[in-house]
Image (spheres, rainbow, N blue to C red):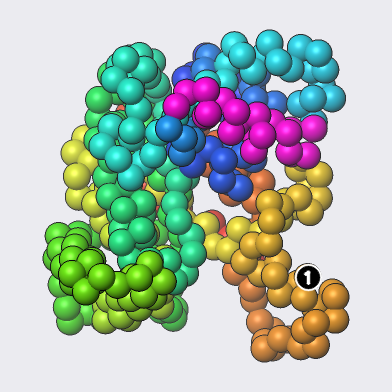
């Protein structure tokens, strides 16, 4: 798709991005503001108790990063006014009903938002099962409920992971996960049952006056156990799968786009090569090797590593928005990767 078509599509749009302090969302926000400075509004959901703390969090965690240096150089003294007019940090949490947004602001947002990008997630492979369900499963459902209240909504774009497919071999089709579908083919997944298992396990731990460390270890173990029962490799891919299932099952006539990137690495070119927030995924191994702390790694000469530079994922998100500008009740699923 021509960049001019995408630029035209974004002009005047009001976009809501969850997980705004996350790695991917930072790059997405910067890309939108730089590529199309005439967006109407960019609402950014941040886990914070109050509006002022959300703004402080935005200034500290987003604006002051090297990533936004390009905008600072471009706009100079005008940067502050530009952000004040177009960027609105919102205090909330996808784990809460109504995303934890105060009712007055929520009503205003629901009247204006045209596009929602849900990039909020917990990505730790062995996350506590209660935390992973709260964010990756129920959080997705809360975003969907919010989306259904937006009178001008064109689409909900959900960032998932390619690993919802588990460890299958061969051709894997880009199709939505069916509600209750498992990877072992012999069992049925009931999300309500998983929620009740977590509640029962937490109550048992509470009744035994278990310490926080014991609760954490027990919840991590439960997540891995339930994931492997249904043939997912870890709690992350398992709960992201359940989040997808809920979205597809409950979306009704809402236009839903699901992007499934593989391992997201540092930037390739934009805004400059090699930018990344902290130590993530395969970068841990690369740095360890570079420092001589890790002498070798398992693999083969013909091995293809499923990684994709971060800005390519962001470009795919923006392109998918423009491609699906016309209303449709069909769920679109895109698997994105660049093999190295």
Relative image position of residue 37 (x, y in whole percent): 65, 18
Coordinates of residue 221 in the picture (x, y in percent): 35, 78
- Tell which residue pokes out farthest to the front in this image: 209
Tell me if residue 237 can be seen.
Answer: no
Image position of 26 with respect to 238: above or below: above
Which residue is rendered at x = 76% and y = 12% of the image? 78
Q: Residue at x 62, y 66 (%)?
A: 281
Res. 56 image quadrant:
top right
Q: In the shown orientation, is residue 195 left or right of residue 255? A: left
Report the predominant secondary structure element of the magenta stretch: helix
Q: Which residues are magenta?
A: 50-69
| Residue receiving disc 1 | 287
Kindly tell me whether residue 91 is visible in this rendering.
yes
Q: Is residue 223 left or right of residue 187?
A: right
Tag 1 secondary structure? helix
Is residue 78 covered in magenta? no
């Amino acid at each position: 798709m021509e960049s001019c078509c995408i630029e035209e599509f974004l002009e005047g749009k009001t976009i809501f991005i969850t997980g705004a302090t996350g790695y991917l969302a930072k790059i997405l926000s910067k890309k939108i503001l730089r590529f199309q400075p005439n967006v109407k509004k960019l609402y950014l959901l941040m886990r914070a108790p109050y509006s002022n703390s959300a703004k402080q969090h935005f200034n500290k965690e987003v604006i002051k990063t090297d990533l936004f240096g390009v905008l600072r150089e471009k706009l100079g003294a005008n940067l502050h006014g530009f952000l004040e007019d177009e960027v609105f940090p919102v205090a909330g949490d996808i784990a809460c009903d109504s995303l934890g947004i105060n009712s007055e602001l929520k009503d205003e947002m629901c009247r204006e938002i045209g596009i929602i990008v849900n990039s909020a997630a917990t990505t730790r492979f062995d996350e506590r099962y209660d935390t992973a369900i709260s964010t990756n499963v129920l959080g997705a459902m809360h975003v969907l409920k919010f989306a259904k209240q937006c009178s001008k909504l064109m689409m909900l774009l959900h960032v998932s992971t390619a690993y919802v497919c588990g460890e299958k071999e061969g051709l894997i089709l880009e199709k939505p996960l069916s509600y209750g579908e498992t990877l072992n083919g012999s069992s049925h997944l009931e999300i309500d049952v998983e929620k009740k298992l977590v509640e029962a396990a937490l109550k048992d731990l509470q009744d035994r006056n278990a310490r926080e460390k014991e609760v954490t270890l027990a919840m991590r173990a439960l997540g891995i156990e339930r994931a492997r029962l249904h043939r997912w490799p870890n709690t992350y891919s398992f709960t992201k799968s359940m989040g997808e299932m809920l979205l597809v099952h409950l979306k009704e006539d809402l236009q839903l786009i699901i992007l499934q990137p593989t391992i997201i690495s540092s930037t390739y070119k934009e805004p400059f090569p090699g930018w990344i927030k902290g130590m993530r995924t395969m970068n841990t191994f690369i740095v360890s090797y570079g420092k001589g702390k890790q002498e070798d790694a398992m693999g083969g000469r013909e091995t293809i590593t499923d990684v994709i530079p971060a800005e390519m994922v962001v470009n795919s998100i923006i392109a998918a928005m423009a491609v699906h500008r016309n209303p449709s009740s069909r769920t679109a699923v895109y698997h994105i990767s660049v093999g190295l």
